[in-house]
Image: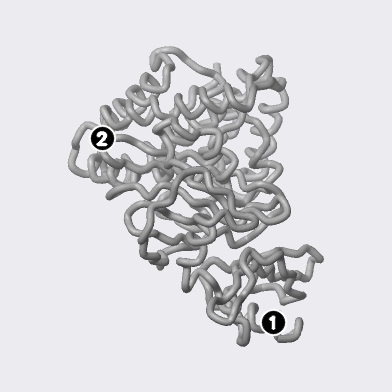
Amino acid sequence: MSGGDLTQTLWDLAISQRWFSGRSGRPLRVDLGDWAAEPTPSTPGLRPGFLVVGFDDGHEETYLIPLLWPLDGDPSDATDDAGILLDLLRADAPGFERLAEIPDDLPARRFTGEQSNTSIFYGEALLAKVFRRIEPGSNIDVELHRELRGSAVVAELYGSWNVDGTDLAVFLEALHEPTDGYDLACRFASEGRDFSEHATALGSALGTVHRILAEKLGTGSVPGADIAAGFRSRLETVASEFAELRPFVPAAERVFDEVADAQVEVQRVHGDCHLGQVLLTGGHWIYVDFEGEPLKSLEERRRPDSPLRDVAGMLRSFGYARAAGDADDDWLTACRRAFLTGYGLDPDRTEPLLAGYETDKAGYEVAYEARYRPHLIRVPLDFLSTLPEGA
């Protein structure tokens, strides 16, 4: 197959997939990586295909399609016959790094609900996540799972697929009958059931994540003035577009003023922490999806930040669960206090930096809800209405 034919073939394949967000662009070329396994007369080979998409503003995006390639025939997406990926990990094939023993006889089943990546279950034991939009360098999800191995608060890492320093897939422990944290919190809220025990456990687990990442990857510090400036810039941007936020700008700015004179300790964090990023399995909580906010660049997502950003994200998520379940203020207050206690913070003590991060997050939510879910804009606005009035 010629280069032009392959480019068109992979474009046609990608255009119908949920993970492909490059539809407004045009196919430029396909770059082929090294063979992980070369084809033989009896078995197809595997090599990564990178579909490069160009856009009118000049930027390019790269999408991975792992190619199952017969010796005589056209290639296909290997995730449609995904057993080969686990076979290559088990065999320590080029580019595959195995970190634990792989059980035998695990049937492959592609998850049909994927969005930005492709997930493949291997029996009840393993899960592979094939990254689709590729940026050069190690993937943050792989990177942080590697550091958190053995912590019991993340799924165990079995291995990865890496080509020329860029992660293409990760192999993780498959969690047994997992329950989504947001769904569970909403159900408790709607039934008027106390969620405090779970909130305490979630706080404790996040504290473990942060402690290990600080120990393994180190910490640093940044001037609070820099963080406050970022808060203010985002606030001004949202307020300039969405009138709903403007009445709360003075109160938010006073919250940010309390941050400016501090020196803030920073480290690697989850970066996109909320109830949808935790799963209850076997009676304990597991944090998942450490890739950070998807709209940020890889450099931004890897940048150290205060762990209170993650804490604030979870606190805001409790507010959404309360609203979805139509629970009362006492339910939310109990969740917040329990989570902070589990994390190791005194819920009766004012934390100006935490207040800054939560206010910053609420400002972002105003913009998001106004654009995509107007019926939920009251959730961040209700929080912002609780900010102290000025003297």
Q: Is residue 256 above or below residue 296?
A: above
Q: Nearer the viewer, residue 184 or 13?
A: 13
Give the residue displayed 39% in from the left and 13% down from the top: 348
Q: Is residue 334 left or right of residue 41?
A: left
Q: Which mark is residue 137?
A: none
Can I make out residue 64 in this image? yes
The front one of 371 and 204 is 204
- In the image, is residue 328 above or below residue 179? above
| Image vertical order of residue 1 relative to residue 53, above or below | below
State if disc 1 and disc 2 touch (CB < 8 Å).
no
Q: Which residue is mark 2?
A: 328
Q: Residue at x 53, y 52 (%)?
A: 170
For the N terminus, the image quarter is bottom right
Residue 116 visible in the displayed image: no
Residue 273 image offset from top left, x and y in percent: 48, 39
Tell me the kind of residue under disc 1: Leu
User: Hey, which quadrant is residue 207 in on the image?
Assistant: top left
Image coordinates for residue 379, horizontal then vertical, percent: 41, 42
Q: Position of residue 382 (x, y in %)?
A: 42, 37
Q: At x 47% / y 56%, what residue is drawn?
A: 128
Q: Which residue is denoted by mark 1 in the rendering?
A: 6
| Amino acid type for the residue under numbered disc 2 | Asp
- Colouring scheme applied when the structure was drawn: one colour
Q: Nearer the viewer, mark 2 or mark 1?
A: 1
- Circle nearer the N terminus (2, 1): 1
Horizontal side of 255 relative to 336 (left or right) equals: right
Q: Position of residue 309 (x, y in %)?
A: 54, 31
User: What residue is drawn where x is 56% and y is 38%?
Assistant: 144
Q: CA distance from mark 2 to mark 1?
A: 57 Å
Under circle 1, the secondary element is helix
Which one is in front, 329 or 147?
Answer: 147
In the image, residue 88 sits, relative to residue 252, either above or below, namely below
